[in-house]
Amino acid sequence: MNAVHAAGGKIAPQLWHQGLSRRGGSGPHPQALSEGPSASEDGGRAMSDADIADTVAAFASAAASARRLGFDAVELHGAHGYLIDQFLWARTNRRSDKYGGDPAARTRFAAEVVRAVRQAVGPDFPVIFRFSQWKSLDYEARLAETPAELEQILAPLADAGVDLFHASTRRYWQTEFADSDLNLAGWARKLTGLPTISVGSVGLSGADFMAQLRGNSDGAATERLEPLLRRMQDDEFDLIAVGRALLGDPDWTAKVRAGRLHELRPFSRTSMQSLA
């Protein structure tokens, strides 16, 4: 953290709970059962009201610790099929109480987490909320089929104290709903008025994206940042997250800032194996 600050950067931890996606017997308490909004076929149990209250309090405590330790913000992981997302998704949330039902009701748990975190860190500490349509085991999953359904999910979170939405997509250039070129982050910004982060295969596109996955790209795709820059100039979203490109080339951001695109080293599975 000190090194990040010394270099002029900001840093935020991501707080998350695996919920039912946790592998049984793992973690610091291997004897504990995995838990989530509803019971699972592999033995995971449904959380009680007391379990939910304890988990909300744990998120708040972790966020307060992050601020006390000197972090600049905190991100709540509500995406990819982890616990918060399990409450948001109808397929994993089959509850009939106040935490289940329509999209707004399924958002109650997430909103309680956000509200508790906001109270713990105060009004001037940024709270980021990451969400996604897709899940780690189901790339076709969707929380919302329409902008109206998405608004039912995001509006309560914004009201609870989210400052910034991190809309996780696998490919940032893909549109989210029909009759609009906006991606998921663009829609989150339009519906809530809050700043958003987009993400997803930055520097990769089309056939080059598949070549990268196979580990045999020639690197040409890493220079194709024009669509990203155009979307940002059009204020579709405010920030872009970069993952694999930085793994393949730790100097990626410095090179892009300096316009040295021809020096970018592409990410590939084989390059990561060589680093290991």
Image (cartoon, rainbow, N blue to C red):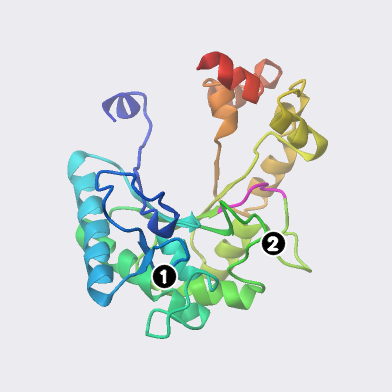
Q: Which residues are magenta?
A: 168-173
Q: Amino acid at mark 1?
A: Ala
Q: Is residue 267 visible?
A: no
- The residue wearing badge 2 is 176
Identify the amino acid type marked 2: Glu
Tell me the residue at 27%/65% (across/down).
Answer: 56
Q: Residue furthest right?
A: 207
**Mark 1 element type:** loop
Residue 3 seen in the figure: yes
Alpha-carbon span between mark 1 and mark 2: 31 Å
Count neighbours of disc 1 (C-alpha within 10 A) and say few if under 14, some if 14 to 19, many if 20 or more: some
The number of callouts visible is 2
Q: Which callout, 1 or 2, points to the residue nearer the camera?
A: 1
Quadrant of image for the N terminus: top left
Of the residues under marks 1 and 2, which one precedes in the sequence?
Answer: 1
The picture places residue 133, in percent across and down from the top left corner, at: 59, 61
- Badge 1 vs badge 2, beta-carbon distance below 8 Å: no
Q: Residues within 10 Å of mark 2 (few under 14, many from 20)?
A: many
- The answer to whether residue 134 is above or below residue 152 is above
Residue 156 locus on image (x, y percent): 43, 74
Locate residue 191: give its quadrant.
bottom right
Q: Is residue 169 magenta?
A: yes
Q: Residue at x 78, y 32 (%)?
A: 208
- The residue indicated by pointer 1 is 39
* Horizontal relation, residue 187 to residue 159: left or right: right
In the depicted view, which residue is nearer to us: 68 or 254? 68
Q: Is residue 55 left or right of residue 188?
A: left
Q: Quadrant of residue 218?
A: top right
Q: Main secondary structure of the magenta part?
A: loop
Query: Which one is nearer the viewer's eye here, 218 or 272?
Result: 272
